[in-house]
Image (cartoon, helix red, strand yellow):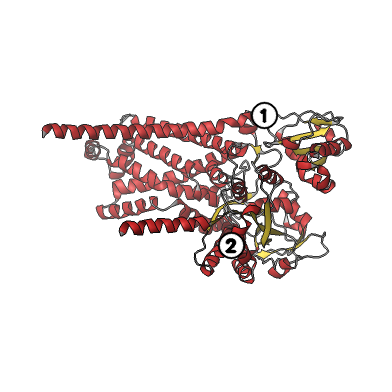
Amino acid sequence: MKKLLIIATILLSIQILGTAQVIKGSDTMLPLSQKLAEQYMKANKGKSVTVNGGGSGVGLAALVDNTTDIAMASRRMKFTEKQKLQETGRTSKEVVVAYDALAVVVNPANKVTNLTREQLEGIFTGKITNWKQVGGDDMKIVVYSRETSSGTYEFFKEHVLKNKNYMNGIMSMPATGAIMQSVAQTKGAIAYVGMAYLNKNVKAIHVSYDKGKTYVEPTVANAKNKTYPIVRPLYYYYDLKVEKKVKPYLDFVLSAEGQAIVSKVGYIPVK
Amino acid sequence: MKKLKRFVERIVEGMLTVSGMVTSVTILLIIIFLFKEGSGLFKSPVVEEGYQLFVNAKNPVNSLNSYEIKQIFDVEVDNWKSLGGADQEIKVFRFEEIFDLVPEEEMGENYALLPQKLGEVVKANPNIVAYLPTQYAPKNLEGVKMVEARKISLLDFFGGKEWMPTSKPSAQLGVLPLILGTLLVSLVAILIALPLGLGVAIYLSELAGEKARNYLKFTIELLAGIPSVVYGFFGLVVLVPIVQRVFHLDVGETAFTGSLILAIMALPTIITVSEDAMRNTPKALREGSLALGATKWQTTYRVVIPSSISGISAAVVLGIGRAIGETMAVLMVTGNAAILPPTLFQPVRTIPATIAAELGEAPAGGTHYQSLFLLGCILFVITMVISIIAEMISKKPQNNGL
């Protein structure tokens, strides 16, 4: 009797493993995908979704190696990655599941509220070093950044600095929490964080991408109607061959219920 | 029965020998692994793996070093004249830009025509420098010249002043600021911790009563048990604002703040080791001094400290060792800016913090990965030298020079 029970359990777990989907990739998207998977499993008994982090690059490499069903990425698939996948004779499909906006933050005591992209580039590459130069008090600018391993670091570099390097000797912090703490207690500080992290201890800068004609505040509404410029899409990539397997989950993610979770976690819904 | 007992003893002996051997071999293997992973760096070209730089064939510039490449792509140098070329503006071209110039349909089956298209672009622009993947490189095409790929040199690595390991196309791997930052933070930490630690040790071994000593020793051992990330958080939230306010600085995350935290963390080691040494002063020496009419203070100052000087030195060296290898607390309070620290009140970046923050995302086997392993080797050599010194000092016979 006992033996039978054990065999039954093993068979059952194999069954579950067989239908389990694996999602792997971006650490930015990890909390979002976990929450989505949790709700999805609650709604669909017997379905199983496993979510792993590791970074966008790791997720896309896993898709090429066929060790994940869905790769989550906070950046677009690179040309070389697409090539690698094609070499194995497969094609991937791209789905945007949410948007993430980056906010530039300063200390609340700072007078400066508006900055253009060119000014931001100057500040983060070290060409502008005093708040006086951008209409603030005579105070040294203290620039904080994320560590080089972060996807946010890369995105900000590509999008705002136009691929130029950050200044030599930028202060780099291990986590967004540490950045928020430092900006809140350093008068001349400036840094970039995900919009979900904004709170009253820091001041969000209104950004202009049209050389100072219009300055846009980073709010969910502005990010949603695309007037706020520093926004990046968050992607799911999957192999077209397993579309049938991942479709129910993707449908859930893009449904009203799934998108409600997206805004609850602090990102901007697609619809 | 006796035979069985002997047999069991043999087995236990054997197990102890084996476990000793296994441990030594493991440690050796780890060291070998460290050096093996790091050693490939000096065989790598300065341009990112899988990519090459191309210029127009009419351009007289044949080779560029890592720093020049970085300056070109950051638009800090914008004229070929300063690099030995003609007087014309530099046009930077990145691979992805080809997709804005040429529609994807024209690139042929499996991008077969892509190298040709790239070649046309390079040929058409005499002032261009193009950063292209080797796979689609316009090789052997007329009007295109490959920039000679130099290897990363020892001087680039040990003498370079910029640490930008993810900079493209050419990573800047100067470790000088990291080495100096690590040494600076640790040495200042010891300068702060030594007088404090020695004071507590003297109090504990010479002045404190039995009850106070037990109580204090317990507290100090508790200090050693706090996880370093807790120290780091304490440093970031409490020490950083204090340092900023007291010294009127722009930033509170400085080398000095790191030193303060490390001093606190090195204190338990310094106190326990030097207190042990002091308490081990032979009773005869202590009582002899008192019998000669010396006061308690004179005995401490003239007899106890000199006789335990080797123990105290060992405590100092062990404390430095603790400070140099510390990662998490330093990562959180020193600001991690990779610059040569001009003063103590500037942000610095240490070697352990760099490894911890970057190794997770560095692609395995790449130059960034290898340079992080070499940093580990440097750290290993530094701590090994320190422990050899500690060993030498503590082996010196006690009561030397009395």
Q: Quadrant of residue B110?
A: top right
Judge whether residue B346 can be spotted in this image: no
Pinpoint the chain carrying mark 2. A
Image quadrant in which the N terminus of chain B is located: top left
> What is the secondary structure assignment of the residue under circle 2?
helix
Chain under numbered label 1: B
Asked where in the image residue B306 lies, by quadrant, the reply is top left
Give the numbered dot on residue A32: 2
Residue at the farthest left position: B1
Residue at 44% from the left image edge and 32% from the top image edge: B29
Q: Are marks 2 and 1 in contact (CB under 8 Å)?
A: no
Q: Position of residue B79 (x, y in %)?
A: 84, 37
Image spot of residue B31 (x, y percent): 47, 33
Q: Amino acid at mark 2?
A: Leu
Q: Is residue B135 rendered to the left or right of residue B227?
A: right
Name which residue type carries label 1: Lys
Crowd class of label 1 (few under 14; some 14 to 19; many from 20; radius 10 Å): some
Q: Nearer the viewer, residue A190 or B94?
A: B94
* Quadrant in which the C terminus of chain B is drawn: top left
Q: What's the mark number on residue B151?
A: 1
- Element at label 1: loop
Foreground pick, B150 / B6? B6
Whether residue B201 is visible to the viewer of this picture, yes or no, is yes
Residue B53 vertical placement versus A136 (above, below): above
Across and down, in percent, residue A177 comes to: 57, 59
Q: Which mark is residue A164?
A: none
